Image (cartoon, rainbow, N blue to C red):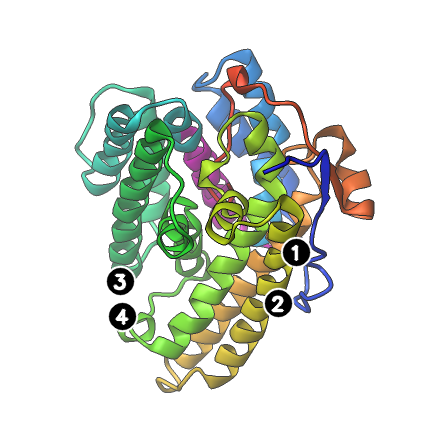
């Protein structure tokens, strides 16, 4: 299959009626979190420069615009922690990625766990902040998502090691977990001071809206990050690559398909939201606020993607205006990557 020199992004803003916003605590609390994560000296200078370019705190400002100062700071810490797990595991084989993930998981699940590693220390800091405000239902669900996330990040590393690209159906299931979007959604209740009953999350209509929102984030993230990932030789964990292989189509057709499917997901999301049942006056307002939070994530992810150099380099404003992405020559020796988190 020929590899074109450029492709045009789908215009996802056109089919997104959701409103964007930004958190007023971004500058101050974001700087605190950036200083916190940098104090651990996790990265080499080159990786650190790339990490800073991603502006994780700006992502949080767009995706949790309603968060109070303390909650906003915790969300920034978590997204920074996720990027640490993601960046470290991207350079590892399946076995080592699983070991890295296990440190994060052990620390989240057991407050007394301590293996002396930097990742353990970072995770402990976050866990203490999170658990101080999270309700029991919220915390239980969050820890389950942590477990699923690490399993799928490890699986991703194994697939990369084997040079294997999954079929579309298998990939969607993996991507929903290794993207960490479920963990990011898992912060909603913490931020909003909610502890919704499990029956809400067991409801198929609620989950139809939930999954449509999660998938919109994943699919948008993958088409935006495709050039960056193919440049580093890490495009196997990307819906664009999966579509090209699964459907035997060219890059532009895959990009166009993502635009079409994003509209399907948006329609599904808006329709499901209208059909969410009632659990009574004590629960319904919290469910509505939770759903509003998913809308902020979908829109915020789009806005953030064109406000940093993470995906499109110095030409990010030009790409936003034209939609044209020129493919970079491959240089996997950079060994700095982005395959997951939110942000992927």
* Residue located beneath label 3 in the image: 137
Q: Residue drawn at (43%, 40%), measured in percent from left and top?
A: 78
Magenta segment: 65-84
Q: Earlier in the sequence, mark 1 or mark 2?
A: 1
Closest to the observer: 122 or 296? 296
Secondary element at image label 4: helix
Which quadrant of the view contains residue 97? top left
| Up-down relation of residue 110 to residue 216 (above or below) | above
The answer to whether the residue labelled 1 contacts the one labelled 2, judged by CB atoms less than 8 Å apart, is: no
Closest to the observer: 259 or 3? 3
Secondary element at image label 3: helix
Assign the magenta stretch its main secondary structure.
Answer: helix
Measure how far apart labels 4 and 1 are at the Cα level: 37 Å
Q: Between tags 3 and 1, which lies in front? A: 1
Q: Residue furthest top?
A: 45
Residue 302 position, x and y percent, is 64, 52
Q: Which mark is residue 263?
A: 2
The answer to whether the residue labelled 3 contacts the one labelled 4, judged by CB atoms less than 8 Å apart, is: yes
Closest to the observer: 281 or 156? 156
Secondary element at image label 2: helix
Q: Residue drawn at (27%, 42%), measured in percent from left and top?
A: 151
């Amino acid at each position: 299959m020929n590899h074109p020199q450029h492709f045009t992004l789908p215009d996802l803003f056109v089919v997104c009626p959701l409103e964007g916003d930004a958190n007023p605590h971004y500058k101050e609390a974001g700087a605190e979190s950036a200083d916190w994560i940098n104090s651990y000296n996790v990265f080499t200078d080159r990786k650190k420069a790339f990490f800073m370019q991603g502006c994780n705190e700006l992502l949080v400002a767009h995706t949790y615009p309603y968060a109070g100062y303390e909650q906003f700071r915790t969300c920034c810490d978590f997204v920074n922690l996720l990027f640490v797990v993601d960046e470290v595991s991207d350079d590892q084989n399946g076995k080592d990625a699983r070991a890295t993930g296990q440190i994060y998981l052990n620390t989240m699940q057991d407050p007394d766990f301590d293996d002396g590693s930097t990742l353990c220390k970072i995770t402990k800091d976050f866990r203490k902040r999170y658990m101080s405000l999270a309700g029991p239902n919220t915390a239980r669900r969050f820890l389950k998502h942590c477990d699923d996330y690490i399993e799928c990040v490890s699986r991703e590393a194994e697939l990369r090691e084997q040079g294997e690209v999954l079929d579309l159906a298998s990939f969607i299931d993996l991507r929903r977990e290794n993207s960490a979007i479920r963990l990011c959604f898992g912060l909603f209740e913490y931020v909003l001071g909610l502890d919704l009953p499990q029956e809400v999350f067991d409801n198929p209509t609620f989950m139809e809206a939930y999954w449509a929102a999660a998938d919109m984030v994943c699919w948008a993230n993958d088409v935006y990050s495709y050039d960056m990932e193919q440049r580093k030789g890490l495009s196997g964990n990307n819906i664009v690559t999966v579509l090209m292989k699964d459907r035997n189509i060219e890059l532009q057709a895959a990009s166009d398909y993502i635009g079409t499917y994003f509209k399907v997901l948006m329609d599904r999301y808006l329709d499901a939201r209208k059909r969410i049942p009632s659990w009574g006056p004590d629960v319904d307002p919290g469910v509505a606020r939770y759903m509003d939070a998913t809308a902020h994530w979908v829109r915020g992810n789009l806005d953030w993607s064109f406000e940093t150099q993470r995906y499109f380099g110095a030409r990010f404003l030009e790409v936003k205006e034209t939609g044209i992405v020129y493919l970079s020559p491959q240089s996997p020796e950079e060994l700095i990557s982005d395959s997951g988190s939110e942000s992927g």
